[in-house]
Amino acid sequence: MVQTTNRFFDEVARLMNDAAGVAQGVRREFDTLFRSQAERILRDLDIVQREEFEAVKEMARLAREENEALKARLADVEGKTAALATAPQSAPPSTHTWNDPASFSADASAPKQGTGDPPPATNPGGP
């Protein structure tokens, strides 16, 4: 049997295979170079990264929710305050004054008329 090996075709096939490998290497180098240049340009433009954007977006959402809850709470407190302000008083205000001897019982702890001082503190167990 005669071997029909043609050296020319073997060399051309090997050359094409090597050229394809070189082309893939060039493509990887181009991709790497392009990506690094794009990242540098974006960094120089001061553009925020996606992760940072999502984190700030989440913070804003939580702040809006808290704001709404505080608005509802404030409205509730204002409603209760308004209801208390318009409700009739259940007991008349105290008319007790320190200068009025009639507001005290007739004992030794009553202040002297016109002094304006509160009654002295008593010590039940001491001198």
Image: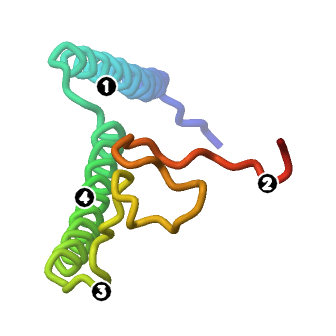
Q: Earlier in the sequence, mark 3 or mark 1?
A: 1
Gap in angstroms between the C-alphas marked 4 and 1: 47 Å
Say what secondary structure mark 1 lies in. Answer: helix
Few, some or many residues within 10 Å of mark 4 (<14, 14–19, 20+): few
The residue labelled by disc 1 is 31
Residue 93, placed above or below residue 66: below
Q: Are the residues tagged 4 and 1 within 8 Å (C-beta)?
A: no
Gap in angstroms between the C-alphas marked 2 and 1: 94 Å
Q: Hey, what amino acid is under mark 1?
A: Asp
Q: Is residue 113 left or right of residue 124?
A: left
Q: Which mark is residue 90?
A: 3
User: Image point 25% across, 77% down: which residue?
Assistant: 80
Q: Which quadrant of the structure image shows residue 55?
A: top left
Residue 54, placed above or below residue 15: below
User: Image point 53% across, 66% down: which residue?
Assistant: 106
Q: Which mark is residue 58?
A: none
The residue labelled by disc 4 is 67
**Where's the N terminus, which quadrant?**
top right
Q: Which quadrant of the structure image shows residue 90?
A: bottom left
Q: Hey, what amino acid is under mark 4?
A: Asn
**Where's the C terminus, which quadrant?**
top right
Q: Earlier in the sequence, mark 2 or mark 3?
A: 3
Gap in angstroms between the C-alphas marked 2 and 3: 35 Å
> At which x and y percent is residue 40?
25, 14
Q: Earlier in the sequence, mark 2 or mark 1?
A: 1
